[in-house]
Image (tube, helix red, strand yellow):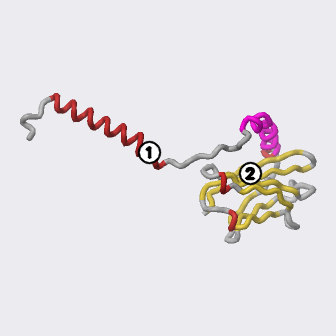
Amino acid sequence: MFKNFSWAHGVALALGLFIAFILFMVFGFTYGQQTSELVSNDYYGDELVYQEVIDAKNNAAKLPEIPKYEELATGMKISFPPEVAPENKNVKFELFRTDDANLDVKKEINLDAKNEILVPKAVISKGPYTLKIKWSHAEIPYQVDYDVLWK
């Protein structure tokens, strides 16, 4: 079999294997990738006010203690320390899902008597989220972001 195998056959075989490899890379990886949604439908409008988000995150970084989240069997609990809890008890939170905008959870809710929020397990699907917590205390805006892998 290899007696009639010349260098021309080797070049043709190498070229054929290279083309097969490139086709596998092009078609094999595009089918396995997840989709990504846009962060916002009004991307350019949101970009113009992004300095406010940067300021809110910088304000939160200066706090001695920030809100924490905890995964429970009943859902996700977000707890505020008493010294940074908003006076009006009003908090905005967003569970942002990068691969499917239909799974996003956006709420503006009031804290309970223990300065906590419980997000029910039923509204959260398994997978990765970015938890964004926004509030104001003494008329100063704050924002904290967490990467969450809900199981």
The image quadrant of residue 27 is top left
Please give the range of residues in magenta: 43-59
Instruction: Single out the residue that lies furthest toward the top.
Output: 8
CA–CA distance between discs 2 and 1? 31 Å
Q: Position of residue 125 (x, y in %)?
A: 63, 62
The answer to which of marks 2 and 1 sits earlier in the sequence is 1
On whether residue 56 falls in the magenta region, the answer is: yes
SS state under label 1 = helix
The circle on residue 37 is none
| Identity, as a three-letter code, of the amino acid under mark 2 | Lys
Q: Disc 1 marks which amino acid?
A: Phe
* Image point (67%, 71%), residue name: 73
- Say which of 150 and 40 sits in front: 40
Residue at image location 77% in from the left, 54% down from the top: 93
Residue position for label 2:
132
Viewer-side residue, 68 vs 106? 106
x and y percent of residue 60 in the render?
80, 46
Picture coordinates of residue 128, whole percent (x, y): 61, 55
Classify mark 2: residues with Cα within 10 Å, few (<14), some (14-19) or many (20+). some
Q: Where in the figure is residue 135, as x and y percent of width and height?
A: 84, 51
Task: Say which residue appears at 74% left-offset and 64% top-offset.
Answer: 119
Q: Is residue 25 left or right of residue 101?
A: left
Whether the magenta-drawn stretch holds residue 95 is answered as no
Q: Quadrant of the C terminus?
A: bottom right
Q: Residue furthest bottom?
A: 73
Callout 2 secondary element: strand
Residue 26 against residue 149 in the figure, above or below: above
Residue at which label 1 appears: 29
Q: Residue furthest left?
A: 3
The image quarter in which residue 12 lies = top left
Above/below status of 56 relative to 151: above
Which marked residue is nearer to the observer: mark 2 or mark 1? Answer: 1
